[in-house]
Amino acid sequence: MNLLEKLDAAAAARKAQLPEGLAAFGIPIDESYSATEARIGERRVLMLGTNNYLGLSFSSECREAAHKAIDREGTGTTGSRMANGNYYGHRALERELAEFYHCRECIVFTTGYQANLGTISGLAGVGDVVLIDGDAHASIYDGCILSGADVIRFRHNDVVDLEKRLRRLGDRSRNTLIVIEGIYSMLGDQAPLAEIVKLKNVYQSTLLLDEAHSLGVLGETGQGLVEKARMIDEVDFITGTFSKSLCGIGGFCVSNHPQLNQLRYISHPYIFTASPSPATIASTRAALKLLRDGYSLREQLWRNAHQLYSCLKETGYCLGPEPGPIVAVLLDSPKQALTLWNGLMAHDIYVNLVLPPAAPEGKSLVRCSINAAHTAEQIGRVCETFSKLYPAVTQ
Ligand code: PMP
């Protein structure tokens, strides 16, 4: 089979798995009206599948900052941070993120994906070990591949399994990077951070925590799981993204280790790509201020998350292990998941569909994301619709 025939075979296999399912992926959003509503074709749809956790995507402060930056500095930097793309705003955002986490170092990357790729491959190399949670995001897997280190997976959120693997490594545990996430993107559950920190101290490993989905969501000032668990001095490296609660695009790594700065000279995903645009940086800086002062937004987000989680649970749906802004409905087959997804779309509700192998444990997921801008009425409508569809989905 040549290269193109291989792609044809992959397309045919995908089509055979669930022919009607293809329409659910990459659906065109024709117009975006607000943090909760959009137009898809002729439909005005309630968006329950974004990562816009604090509902800031239309905030006037962020939009104004972005407009001003375009007028002042143009649309793009046209270059890498290492060359002509290292503007004042990138450095200011690095200082502000470092200060937000009370850390001495911060590096801003062009996406959250590249933050993981660049940090993991900058820290670990051939001969080292990266120990990753079984539900880790693709950017973590890809960072491991780029690093050339030996990659070992431990069972999702299972500290007993993690300890077993650290013990087996013997002396190599000191050259081991453990990578976990604050809130896991598929099931929405949180890492047992305090227990993992204990292990990393016993085995003298290094810990990287990806707060992509927990930044803005957990902790008094929104730092993430690290703040909720009061572990800022115990976690070696924190990565995160601007593409979720900060409503921009970009990523970062913060640390108290001065060595983080060396990544600027060795990390290809930092060096060999253009830096984020001035507008992106400006809106992210404005959003970070709102996030930091956003205690009441976080309270609203959690009220909304509990409302959705408890009503879907009462209806009888099988859900991810704990309430949170990601409410994953677990279904036994892709067909059931598609029936639910189509039913919700027919009622003008957009959610994310996740089919194997992307979903954990061979399950299929209808993955809802709630945000602080959803109203109780909107969530009530979602609950009613889920309840109406329950018999058809579970028959
Ligand atoms: N880490 C996790 C856990 C994620 O879920 C994502 C995005 N889905 C990323 C990193 C990458 O973020 P970005 O969209 O900024 O590339």
Image: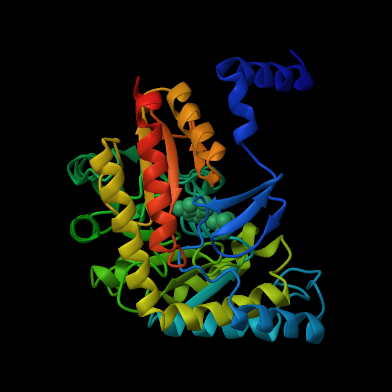
Between 113 and 334, the one nearer to me in the picture = 334
Q: Position of residue 48 (x, y in %)?
A: 49, 51
Q: Is residue 300 above or below residue 23?
A: below
Color encoding of the figure: rainbow
Quadrant of the snapshot with the N terminus: top right
Question: Which residue is rendered at x = 35% and y = 26% of the image?
Answer: 391
Q: Is residue 162 above or below residue 18?
A: below
In the image: residue 108, left or right of residue 1: left
Between 143 and 48, the one nearer to me in the picture = 48
In the image: residue 15, left or right of residue 236: right
Residue 267 at least partly seen: yes
Residue 121 at least partly seen: no
Question: Which residue is rendered at x = 66% and y = 41% of the image?
Answer: 27
Question: Which residue is rendered at x = 24% and y = 45% of the image?
Answer: 166
Q: Position of residue 23 (x, y in %)?
A: 64, 31
Q: Is residue 29 above or below residue 266?
A: above
Between 309 and 265, the one nearer to me in the picture = 309
